[in-house]
Image: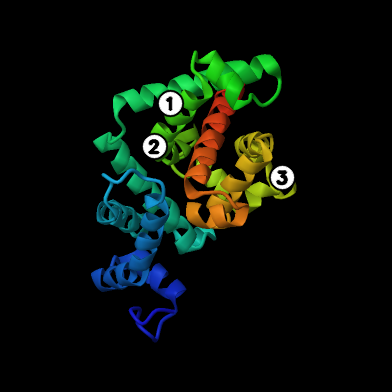
Amino acid sequence: MGNSLPEQKTEEELWLIYRKNRDPNIREAFIKQYAPLVKYVAGKVAVGMPHNVEFDDLVGFGVFGLLDAIDKFDPDKNVKFKTYAVTRIRGAIFDELRSIDWVPRSVRQKTREVEDAIGTLEAQLGRTATDQEIASAMGMDEAEYSKTIMKISGTSILSLHDVWFSGDENDKVSIGDSIEAPASLNPDVMVEKDEIRRVIVEAINELPDKEKKILVLYYYEDLTLKEIGQVLEVTESRVSQLHTKAILRLRSKLTNIRKGIM
């Protein structure tokens, strides 16, 4: 329990009181208590972002998510506030990044082209396409393809948080959420409602070993790209490149699957 919440009440009790009377003092206490969470989420998002995206801006965007989470949290739903807030904070940051459209159109276009090339190739081949095959399908040599991947690597993290499936307000599924939810890595514990997550996890499992490892270390084990480089004994820029390839491959796989199920 943080010092910012009144000592004589448990946090659960305070949530119930706040739901009833919207006491601004309790709201203020919750904001203070959970402010570090915004910095934590912003720090995770900042990794791999281009330099023109400021950490302080990300924190500012995330605060809106925290306020939204405090106002909409329902203690009866058996979800920890922290879990709920992280999703809201991250969502607010990505919504804001999307609305200011910081990704140059040329990069967006190139991302789509690579995704399309991977999707078409892998559907034809029935297996994972190599860099050489993808480059050749795009009329490039491998060095050019490598440069293209580096150019789009700063924007690939955002694309993981596009909503891939949307039910109601609380039922949105993004690829990033599916990698981050520990249960999603164990298909045995999934309930039927998580069919979409299962599809995403299957697509992750089909990735080349190193790419899969990077996604799990980054999203599930919370390691930075630099730390992953130390674990896999490769440079940080190599990790960034593999991370981007994994995301492009994953998105193209899922687009193919979605076409099949729509």
Disc 2 versus disc 1: distance between alpha carbons? 9 Å
Which residue is painted at 35% across and 60% down in the image? 38
The dot on residue 187 is 3
Q: Is residue 118 above or below residue 5?
A: above
Which colour scheme appears in the figure? rainbow
Provide residue 191's location: percent of width, then percent of height: 68, 45
The amino acid type found where label 2 is placed reads Thr
| Quadrant in the picture for the N terminus | bottom left
Q: Helix or strand or loop: what does disc 2 sit on?
A: helix
- Mark 2 — residue? 155
The answer to which of marks 3 and 2 sits earlier in the sequence is 2
CB of mark 3 within 8 Å of CB of mark 1? no
- Mark 1 — residue? 111
Q: Is residue 5 above or below residue 260?
A: below
Disc 3 versus disc 2: distance between alpha carbons? 29 Å
Q: Residues within 10 Å of mark 3 (few under 14, many from 20)?
A: some
The dot on residue 153 is none
Provide residue 166's location: percent of width, then percent of height: 48, 34
Would residue 261 be seen by someone viewing this image from the given angle?
no
Q: Is residue 57 left or right of residue 219?
A: left
CB of mark 3 within 8 Å of CB of mark 2? no
Would residue 230 be seen by someone viewing this image from the given angle?
yes
Q: Helix or strand or loop: what does disc 3 sit on?
A: helix
Provide residue 209's location: percent of width, then percent of height: 68, 41
| Quadrant in the picture for the C terminus | top right
